[in-house]
Image (spheres, rainbow, N blue to C red):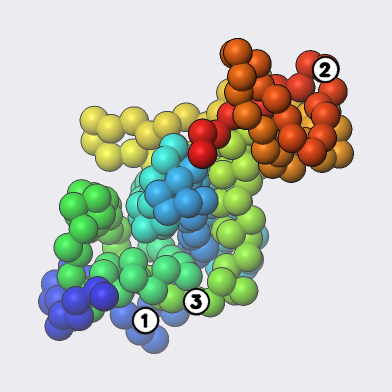
């Protein structure tokens, strides 16, 4: 369980919403990150809009084998990097990661050695902004970022056709660190493994005699590859 702590003063006091910040040139970034396996193939998605709801950018990147929380922080870092590089000094972040949101607000400590450098880098980038807010939302209200994160994971796993890749992508990295690049087109186009016959995934039993595998209770067509598990 995360360790609660008292809200920090200084840098992260600006993360609390205030009436003075409302309607004052803030852009909004919906962030999401995920991993299939935790850790597993991971990616993040960021959906950025201006005050009028106009879409400014869609960021989506596969980051290799990481945890869910590392992917969530990668999405936050990408949104901060995009805002800074494009001259936006006021940023409101929406995330469905309660852990990350409360850590950034100073309500939870950051004990994980994997998350600590990401947290510190987020602090440095937030300090360069004039205004910053972050808030938690349920996944249903973060659907665009969730879609982009899943596209990133699909690409990294070779499941997504190139035609559905987002038109705008952005890399996010720590100083001196290069995150894994999206899967190459050749890898993304790799078809799913063909099943040579309807019962290909069925486990059959047998025995080995004279170096030959003898199948009990059935036959296999020629050319079929089998995996032998010793009992």
For disc 1, the marked residue is: 17
Upstream in sequence: badge 1 or badge 3: 1
* Front position in the image: 204 or 45: 204
Residue 132's disc number:
none
Comparing marks 2 and 3, which lies closer to the viewer? 2
Could one spot residue 189 in this view of the protein?
no
Q: Which residue is mark 3?
A: 137
Q: Residues within 10 Å of mark 3 (few under 14, many from 20)?
A: some
Q: Residue drawn 39% across and 86% down?
A: 19
Q: Quadrant of the N terminus?
A: bottom left
Residue 52 % position (x, y): 62, 67
Q: Secondary structure at mark 2?
A: loop
- Vertical side of 204 occupied by 120: above or below: below
Along the horizontal axis of the image, is 54 left or right of 95? right
Counting residues from the start of the chain, the first of labels 1 and 2 encountered is 1
- Tell me how far mark 2 sits from mark 3, CA to CA: 55 Å
């Amino acid at each position: 369980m995360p360790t609660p702590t008292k809200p920090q003063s200084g840098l992260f006091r600006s993360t609390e919403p205030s009436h003075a910040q409302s309607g004052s040139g803030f852009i909004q970034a919906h962030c999401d990150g995920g991993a299939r396996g935790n850790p597993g193939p991971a990616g993040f998605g960021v959906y950025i809009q201006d005050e009028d709801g106009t879409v400014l950018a869609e960021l989506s990147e596969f980051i290799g084998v990481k945890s869910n929380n590392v992917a969530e922080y990668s999405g936050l870092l990408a949104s901060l990097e995009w805002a800074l590089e494009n001259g936006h000094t006021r940023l409101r972040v929406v995330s469905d990661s309660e852990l990350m949101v409360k850590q950034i607000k100073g309500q939870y400590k950051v004990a994980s050695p994997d998350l600590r450098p990401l947290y510190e880098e987020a602090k440095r980038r937030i300090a360069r902004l004039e205004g910053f807010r972050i808030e938690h939302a349920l996944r249903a209200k973060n659907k665009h970022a969730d879609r982009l994160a899943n596209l990133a994971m699909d690409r990294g796993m070779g499941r997504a056709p190139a035609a559905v890749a987002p038109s705008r992508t952005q890399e996010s990295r720590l100083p001196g660190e290069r995150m894994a690049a999206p899967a190459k087109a050749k890898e993304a186009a790799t078809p799913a493994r063909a099943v040579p016959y309807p019962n290909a995934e069925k486990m059959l039993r047998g025995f080995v005699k004279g170096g030959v595998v003898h199948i009990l209770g059935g036959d296999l067509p020629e050319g079929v590859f089998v995996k032998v598990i010793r009992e």
